[in-house]
Image (cartoon, helix red, strand yellow):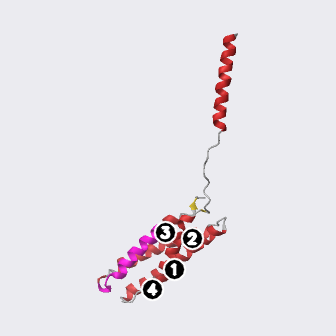
């Protein structure tokens, strides 16, 4: 009988200590940044890649540019941008700041597409003057600078 009571007491003590261990709360920090449900990092990485390639293209003399290859590459950039634009167009963000950021990225993608169209025209015309990149680069810098203010959570 004593053995049963001692065993029961030990089991109760073990159970109470295990319950006590579970009762201590963990200090998990909550990320206060607004949520975006689209992968802005990928969009901006592709944008940076496009910018580098377009800059290389614009630095080549027009008589050495392979028109077919250059246009094909630029149309590929535009196709990627159109996919992103379609994806972003269909997404609704819960927070106003997230929606504003989405609109900024969409504005950038549209600006880049306009630049691509003008560049294609310049390549075909073997025009020495290139379209201005200023507004596109300014938008890119603004979008890239803000990306760390958001956290990406896919839907």
Q: CA distance from mark 3 to mark 1?
A: 13 Å
Q: Nearer the viewer, residue 120 or 53?
A: 53
Q: Is residue 105 magenta?
A: no
Q: Which mark is residue 132?
A: 4
How many residues crowd mark 4 within 10 Å: few (<14), some (14–19), many (20+)?
few
Q: Give the foreground label among 2 and 1.
A: 1
Mark 4 vs mark 3: which is more N-terminal?
3
| Residues shaded magenta | 45-63
9 left or right, relative to 139:
right
Determine the secondary structure under disc 2: helix
**Residue shown at 39% from the left, 74% from the top:** 52
- Return the residue at label 1: 111
Q: Nearer the viewer, residue 46 or 82?
A: 46
How many residues crowd mark 3 within 10 Å: few (<14), some (14–19), many (20+)?
some
**Residue shown at 59% from the left, 70% from the top:** 102
Q: Which mark is residue 86?
A: 2
How many residues crowd mark 1 within 10 Å: few (<14), some (14–19), many (20+)?
some
Give the vertical position of 5 relative to 34 (above or below).
Answer: above
Q: Give the foreground label among 1 and 4.
A: 4
Mark 3 vs mark 2: which is more N-terminal?
3
Mark 3 vs mark 1: which is more N-terminal?
3
143 left or right, relative to 65:
right
111 left or right, relative to 21:
left
């Amino acid at each position: 009988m004593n053995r049963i009571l001692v065993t029961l007491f030990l089991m109760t003590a073990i159970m109470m200590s295990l319950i006590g261990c579970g009762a201590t709360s963990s200090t998990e920090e909550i990320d206060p940044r607004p949520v975006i449900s689209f992968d802005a990092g990928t969009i901006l990485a592709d944008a940076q890649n496009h910018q580098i390639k377009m800059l290389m293209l614009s630095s080549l003399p027009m008589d050495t540019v392979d028109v077919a290859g250059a246009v094909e590459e630029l149309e590929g950039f535009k196709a990627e941008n159109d996919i992103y634009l379609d994806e972003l167009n269909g997404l609704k963000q819960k927070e106003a700041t997230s929606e504003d950021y989405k609109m900024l990225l969409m504005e950038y993608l549209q600006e880049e597409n306009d630049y691509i169209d003008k560049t294609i025209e310049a390549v075909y015309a073997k025009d020495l003057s290139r379209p201005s990149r200023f507004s596109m680069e300014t938008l890119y810098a603004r979008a890239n600078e803000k990306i760390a203010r958001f956290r990406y959570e896919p839907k």
